[in-house]
Image (cartoon, grey):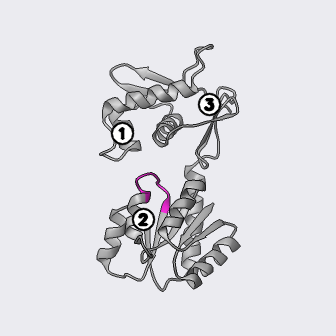
Amino acid sequence: MNVLIVEDYKKINDLLYTFASRDGYTTFQTYDAETAIEVLGKEKIDVILLDLMLPNMQGEAFISQIRSFSDVYIIVLSAKIDVENRVDVISIGADDYMTKPFSIDEVVAKLKNIQKRLVVNQPTRLSFNHAHLTLLPISREVYIDHQLITLTKHEYEILLLLAKHPNIVYTRDMIIEECFDDSEAYDRVIDVFIKNIRKKLDNKESGLSYIKTHYGIGYQFGGIKDE
């Protein structure tokens, strides 16, 4: 599991880094939001330990920006103890809130619990049609005939949703609810995403198509899962 520390107070940052690394996590240290965003653009981060009082960009603004493109788990570490402050950061997208001074054992315990949930909720590999299509959910990679292909964020999330639930026919509204914020999509946009996914995945020569259309209803995954 990859952990990103965003804390401008070096002693706390180093302490978190030491204990997270000791427990086997790949850990990145940053001291401001701008650098943290750069790391997120280069690395697959699973958990962010975030101080709110940062130079230049405050933690609240950082959370809002991150939530525009990522659902990474965010634990806020803050000296602000008011209930209103907790509610505010949770409402804009934080997943958990710990007040300073905090127990390092509690932070470590939270990281362990998150790692267990990631393992349970995210299969490490989904393979279909004799490995013609392979999804690696933790790294968000997709392969066709063992060649890495590029999907946009929403193309990937739609594909993963359908692939994980092959027995369900998803309406456009269901896909929007699962994969988009309310303001990000309307029903006909889903048709465009499905069309783009098919272009990247389907084998025209064999007629293989991974997404079935149920006219007037929605879409369903059509791949055959490998044993």
Q: Which residues are magenta?
A: 66-73
The numbered dot on residue 37 is none
Q: Measuring 32% from the left and 35% from the top, which residue is drawn there?
A: 173
Amino acid carrying label 2: it is Phe
Whichever of labels 1 and 3 marks the residue nearer the N terminus, that label is 1
Which of the 4 image quarters holds residue 82?
Answer: bottom left
Q: Residue at x 50, y 72 (%)?
A: 32
> Residue at (57%, 82%) from the top-left corner?
10
* Placement of the N terminus among the 4 image quadrants: bottom right
Q: Which mark is residue 176?
A: 1
CA neighbours of label 1 inside 10 A, class few (<14), some (14 to 19), many (20+): many
Task: Give x and y (percent) for residue 97.
Answer: 43, 72
Please, what secondary structure does the residue beneath circle 3 have? loop
Magenta stretch holds residue 136: no
Disc 2 versus disc 1: distance between alpha carbons?
A: 25 Å
Tell whether label 3 touches label 2 (CB within 8 Å).
no
Q: Earlier in the sequence, mark 2 or mark 1?
A: 2
The part of the image, by quadrant, that contains residue 219 is: top left
Please give the residue where the numbered disc 3 appears in the rendered image: 225
Q: Which residue is mark 2?
A: 62
